[in-house]
Image (cartoon, coloured by chain):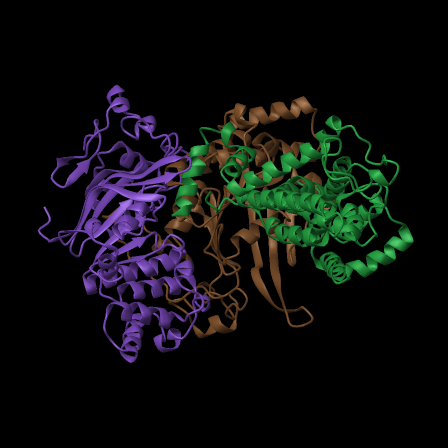
Amino acid sequence: MDNREVLVDIKNLRTFFYTEDGVVPAVDGIDLTIHRGEVVGLVGESGCGKSVTALSIMRLIPNPPGKIIGGDIYFHGENLLAKNDEEMRQIRGDKISMIFQEPMTSLNPVYTVGNQISEAITLHQKIDEAEAKKRTIEMLHLVGIPEPERRYSQYPHEMSGGMRQRVMIAMALSSNPELLISDEATTALDVTIQAQILDLMRGLQKKLGMAILIITHNLAVVAEMAETIAIAYAGKIVENASAKEIFRSPRHPYTYGLLQSIPKFTEKKTNEPLPAIEGMVPSPYHMPKGCRYNPRCPFATEKCREEEPEIVEVTPGHLIRCFHPIES
Amino acid sequence: MATKLVEVQKLKKWFPIKGGIFSTVVASVKAVDEVDFFIYQGETLGLVGESGSGKTTAGRTLLKLLQPTGGKIQYKGADITDYSPTQMRPLRRNMQIMFQDPYGSLNPRMPVGDIIQEPLDVHVIGTRKERHDAVTTMMETVGLRPEYEKRYPHEFSGGQRQRIGLARALILNPELLVLDEPISALDVSIQSQIINLLQELQQRLNLTYLFIAHDLAVVRHMSDRVAVMYLGKVVETAENDELFDHPLHPYTQALLSAVPVPDPDVKRERIILQGDIPSPVNPPSGCHFRTRCPYAMPICKEQEPAVVEAAPGHTVSCHLLTKK
Amino acid sequence: MAEKALEAKKKGQQKTSDEYSYIGMVTHRLKRHKLAMAGVIMLVLMLVFVFVGPLVWRLDPNEQIEGLEGMFLTPSREHPMGTDDYGRDVLARMFYGGRISLSIGFISAVSSTLIGAFVGLVAGYYGGWIDNLLMRFTDAMLSIPTFPLLIALASVMGKGVTQIIMVIVVFGWMSDARLVRGMVLSLKEQEYVEAARAIGASAGRIMWRHLFPNTLAVLIVSTTIGIGSAIIYEASISFLGFGVQAPVASWGNMLQNAQQFIWTAPRLIVYPGMAIFLTVLGFNFFGDGLRDAIDPKLKL
């Protein structure tokens, strides 16, 4: 479908955590393709493996207890899982950057923000200090921070949450990455500030052309940002399609249920109950047999309780992992 | 029409900031600064605002969990502003609160049966057996299995913990329930379960809700009327549809336009507010919103806008409307 | 990521509730802690020695063998640890001295923890001038040089087991008061405390039912280590001659008594010295292990 060059290709990624209470299959079958310059949304609830996927791409899974035990992550056709630590360090923060939910803990409180961005720049680019400072101020300006010269010498605690997230974006983009991973980057922000940051990310994406992987639990955020959306549930991708398809004709019962259950901001108040999804996310130590969604699925049959469905392409570009897809 | 169950007038809650050698009050966080609102019996008032707006403080001050700095709180016509803790005790049975944090709001060292029963113990209601029966019934009411009463909070999921918190709040049969962001810490698929439960119980038990939230979609779904707060002030109050369809205050307009919509085909005109929310220690003079307002005028800096009724039941405080 | 594992752990607990109760979890973690287990073994052996020993070895610790030939007997079948300067059986005195020393350690550590917890709870919960008053008093108590005052006290109150316990308690509660106050300051901001206030619970109820149980784990650790230091304290005071008085035996006054014979009968120092050393070490190992076991952030 997409003629653009494939940037990232994740094939059947499996990342497990070995804890004293048992094995947690945090990621157990994630397939994801990101094209050059594409904005992809990875959506799911807590425990679906979305953040672990991001950390796996960055090869930042803490070992122990975590370990990537299977699959491949191709970046420009090269398998990141085959790279050694030194090679990975060259890529991390340079060609692939990441921003997190909590900008306060991602910044070191004892250094000025300017210092931290400059350091990130000199780490990957051979330029002198003065040059790095100039570039840092450019970056701060680019992410819409007023008076970048003054802000350069401020400490993280002197900034608001929205400002700190801008700083994080400036730092992440300072190396001109080809892929930016945003892990719940706007979740902790207020609505009006979230709108600012999303607007900024959209603008920068157009301007700089990098691909973005947006990881979030908020369907509305990906609806606004992403071209392609992957829905994860209990460590597996259950549906992957263009944003339009996901919202117009979801085929997986989980996607469908999720979309049905969220209150619509644009709809008038009714006293009707929301069509909620019953039950709760399974415990990672006790994953259900067969399809992992079967205990909550209204369409589940004996087959769903016994066999695990594979992910298949039902229509061009629309992949689902379900025996009984919803008819579009 | 309906009667007002609770009403606050010019409600003020300032938190002193102490400093210097003698710990004198050097400034105040004006968390709630002369706020008016009321709630009709049996309705849900949505109280919306971003961080620092004072919505949570307003809810707690209303319940007198915090002593107001100024203004008046009326409950069923009685002025309870200066009630002592002893005078408040019988009233506590009528007004309860459900919290945001499913982990912090339950004592980790108490079995859930005891947690739910504690209000009955405190108010010495019924015999031992009657209290226990009430706990069983209440657990069923909120969708928990009564045989779990001996378990501890950490053995439950976030959604179940919120049900426990709700059971504790409801066991005294209150009239007013303050819901302080009751679903914002939950997973998406669990949120709708709790929303449905809250709505069902409201009808069944004839409850009055003050629903504090920042998620506008949920507020729209839940509320009869909505009040919007910004930096310690209520800037606009109206009936649900009226507010969402015809927002009059520039802040409300911007807030509504900022909400992302789960529909890729909807392309909305977006008002992106510039700058950050100012600190409530040092709010801007005049209208608190003027530093970010796209329509700010000279008068906004000098004078605080009065509250005007733009339409029946629709009150706004903005100079754009007073000038007309 | 650690959070992730922890989160996962929380979820895992839903299914297996009983085996993962709080006490169950702490016990489970404690069992994996080698040092703590070493401490437990040392303590169990010591307790058996002190409390079961006298049931088997039925000699009166105060019975003296008349005459010079009964003094300073070297270990033999009749007297496995020999006899002391009065011709008393050292093993029997080790049993009874150990009972006294351990009891003093236990009672004074528990009492000082309870007093400290009470002061800390009240100071932390009420805050304001009450907090100021109590904490300044605590500071003042910490600034008093213990030993000189102790000698003064001993001359007023007399010497004996009760007095020594009182002295250890009076000078021992301050660190627990500070510990509890610090915890209460953060605990009282928790929403469940607010929830208790919202249902109309009294201050006493909130402190007793909601705050105290949540400091308990840390207090148990503090008491455990406190027993060790109380035993040392008793030994030091007795060694100076202001503690447990003869003929009642304690490990401390056995040491004191033995110092004059350090060249003639060094074993009289070695036995109580080793007993104190091993017991205190046992309590410290166990206490440290317990501290690690109740800390959910620490991976064991």
B287 w.r.t. A313: above or below: below
On the image, which quarter does residue C42 sit in? Answer: top right
Residue A136, percent from left and from top: 30, 73
| Residue A31 visible in the shown view | no
Pick the front one: A261 or B208? A261
Residue B168, percent from left and from top: 58, 35
Output the letter for the chain in brown.
B
The quadrant in which the N terminus of chain B is found is: top right
> Which tint is chain A?
purple
Left or right: A57, with C116 as reference point? left
Residue B36, percent from left and from top: 57, 54
- Please name the residue shown 78% across and 28% down the image: C58
Output the letter for the chain in green.
C
Pick the front one: B209 or C164? C164
Pick the front one: C113 or C5? C113
Left or right: C105, with A37 as reference point? right
Task: Single out the residue that lies furthest toward the bottom.
Answer: A130
| Residue A242 visible in the shown view | yes
- Please name the residue shown 39% across and 44% down the image: C4
Pick the front one: C111 or A299? C111
Residue A77, percent from left and from top: 13, 52
Task: Single out the residue that lies furthest toward the front.
Answer: C69
Total tally of numbered discs in the picture: 0
